[in-house]
Every structure is written in structure tokens, then in C-alpha cells.
Image (cartoon, rainbow, N blue to C red):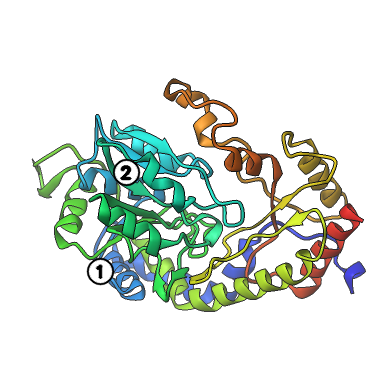
Amino acid sequence: MIQSVNSVPAFDIKQQYAAIEAEVSHAVLEVLSSGRYIGGPAVEGFEQQFAAYHGVDECVACNSGTDALYLALRALEIGAGDEVITSPFSFFATTEVISAVGATPVFVDVDATTFNLDVTQIAAAITPKTKAIIPVHLFGLPVDMTALMAIAQDHNLAVIEDCAQATGASWNNQKVGSIGHIGCFSFYPTKNLGGCGDGGAITTNDSAIAAKLRVLREHGSKVRYIHEEIGVNSRLDAIQAVILQIKLRYLDIWNKQRQQIGAYYYQYLSQIPGIIPPQELLGGEAVWNQYTIRVSSEDRNGASSKYRDWVRTQLQDQGVSTMLYYPRPLHLQPVYESLGYQPGQLPISEQACHQVISLPMFPELKQEQQDKVIYALKDCFS
């Protein structure tokens, strides 16, 4: 059966679309015939459904996950002179928005098994300038939000959850995005809940924050042509909203399939010396937007990415495509050179950048494809 599988893609969003094509086509055509392409009942309906799914009072849709984070910081009036604690092992958008509002990112190293913020190191990074923490639920694994919220409460800090890769994940049976003060989501097509273009949303139980977010996303205006502050144009298109409404109905099913694939991977990959699979913390329920392993060898200390790159090449030669998230940590990006971080200062994040490989992961991934991935890795480490 393994031999019958020629290749395994890292992800495949076409299969998902094929399964719901009729529903999507009908909904999109209804929007097109309505003439309501910006805002309106389609967007309002999605906001209500997304809020209900997460058990929160408010959802404000916007045009990307990046804008969701930016608007969240703006709504909390975080800016010049403020500091925001976050992870150095994430996509650049997480810190880009901190800099965009004039604040300074402060990096805390990550945990070696989850790739998420090492919560035990947060308190030492807090200063009188610290105003917020942005925990990133990376690759669909939830952060230890119990411990993090306790720290935030002790120091009177806002918590903005970066849920871009974790829609549907939970911590102690509570959906991520509903635990902190604000949750930020991305609907980029490859996300667990992905649109057919860019999109984002912000969740909160604070009605005052939600009201401010709605003003900010509309050029700082409540009433047309009357502008109370400097805002942006960040609206979710109605076509994306109806597509997301349809996909939201299937999200739990798709996430369950991801979880089954993740469990199958772990069962076999955890037995291969040289492979370190990710692990959920007790209390967390991951949804595996990516399934990211670390590779190591007894005669290599992880200081170089050459071994990881060799493994990826071997997998590609056997028809297994992989992805690389992220080859350079944020604290060592050229744009943050002025912050003064040095190589070796955040060792777990730096080591992860040299060792990580993201394996094929999407709900429709067949068992024979999973087997091909596992056997290809066994060959690499035999």
C-alpha cells in the first residue's frame, strides 16, 4: 500500500473545497446577487456565529490576522514607551504589530516540546513599562493559559491571544481566544478555518473594547465622514464571511481528523531515535495546524541547520513534501538588531529554528499517506 502513494503534499486545500463546493458556490452567488459586498448581514451573521462558537460576547471581523493583532493593541491604547512580552518563535506579524503601534517587543524563550512561551520565564521579563503579553498558540498547541493568566493578573497586564494557527483549540475545555482579554484569529486559506482569501477576527467579552475595535476598523469613524481618531480600513468581505460560515459548521470535524493524524504520527515517530515530536500539555487540546517535529543526531548538537536540511531533502526525494516554520527567530531578525539581543540568549528558540520540520498535515490526509511519511522518516534515521 505504501508503494501505491507516489507523493505526499505538505497541505492540500483543494480537497476541502471540493467537498463543500456546492454549498460555497450557492452562498457566494447569493452574495453577488445581493449587491452587499462589504459589511451587511453576511458579515454580521458570521461574527455572531464565531462569537457563539467561542463562548464570548463579541466578535469583530477584520481583513487579516495581522490586522486583528494590530487593532487589539490599538484598542488597548498600547503605544510608544510600552513593552509587550511575546515569543521569538512565531511568524513576524506577531511582533510587527507591536512595533507598528510604537511599542517594544520583549522576547521570552519557548518550551522545547510545545514551541510555546515558557510561562516560567515571563515574570522575570516584566518591567514597569510592560503593558501586555501576546501568547502565541503556535502550530495549534495551546499555551498554559492558567499559569499565564495568573501572572497577568498579578501584574495587571492585558493578554492578547494570538490564535492564528489554533482556531478550535482549547485549554481546560475553554476555547483559545476566550481566555485572555482579546483573541486574534487569521482566516488565511491554510489555517484550520481558512477562507478563500485573507480575513481575520477579534474576540472579547469586553463590550467597550469591541466598540472601539469597530471604530478603528472603519477609519476611526462611528458616523460616516465623522472621524474620532486615526483608524484603518480593515473589513472582512461578505463573500469571505459566507464561506467562513459554511466552513465553521465543519470545523470540529476537520479538527478531529487533524487530531487523529497527530496521534498516529506521535504513536510511531516517538519511537524513532533522533525525532522529537511535539507534545500537548496536560489540560491542552491541540488542533495541529502544523505537525512540527524536531530532528537531532547524537553527533550533531543542533547548532547548524544542515542536518535538518539533509533530512528534508531525503524526504523530498521519497516524495514527502515538508514545510519550514521558522528558519530565524524574531529576536535575531535584522529589523530588531537595535534591541540588542545576541545569539545564544534565547537558546531553545534558536535551536528549534535549526531543527524543526513541519510534516504533511491536513484533514484529508489518508492513512497510506501518513504511513509513507513515517516510513520515509524511519529510512532517514535507520
- Residue drawn at x 56%, y 74% is 254
Q: Toward which corner of the image does residue 32 lie, by quadrant? A: bottom left
Q: Residue furthest top?
A: 338
Q: Nearer the viewer's eye, disc 2 or disc 1?
A: 2
Element type at marker 2? helix
71 horizontally vs 338: left or right: left
Query: Which is more toward the observer, 300 or 28?
Result: 300
Element type at marker 1? helix
190 horizontally vs 12: left or right: left
Query: Which is more toward the observer, 151 or 12?
Result: 151
Task: Please state the horizontal and vertical placement of residue 124, each as a whole percent of the image.
Answer: 39, 42
**Residue matched to label 2:** 70
**Which image quadrant: the N terminus?**
bottom right
- Residue drawn at x 22%, y 65% is 205
Task: Please state the horizontal and vertical placement of residue 230, each as a whole percent of the image.
Answer: 17, 37
Q: Is residue 29 above or below residue 119?
A: below
Q: Is residue 121 above or below residue 335?
A: below
The circle on residue 25 is none
Q: Name the amino acid, label 1.
A: Pro
Q: Which of disc 1 and disc 2 is earlier in sequence? A: 1
Task: Please state the horizontal and vertical placement of residue 35, each as a whole percent of the image.
Answer: 29, 62
- Residue drawn at x 41%, y 52% is 135
**Which image quadrant: the C terminus?**
bottom right
Q: Toward which corner of the image does residue 208 lie, by quadrant? A: bottom left
Asked whether the beta carbons under mark 2 and mark 1 sit within 8 Å of each other, the answer is no
**Residue matched to label 1:** 41
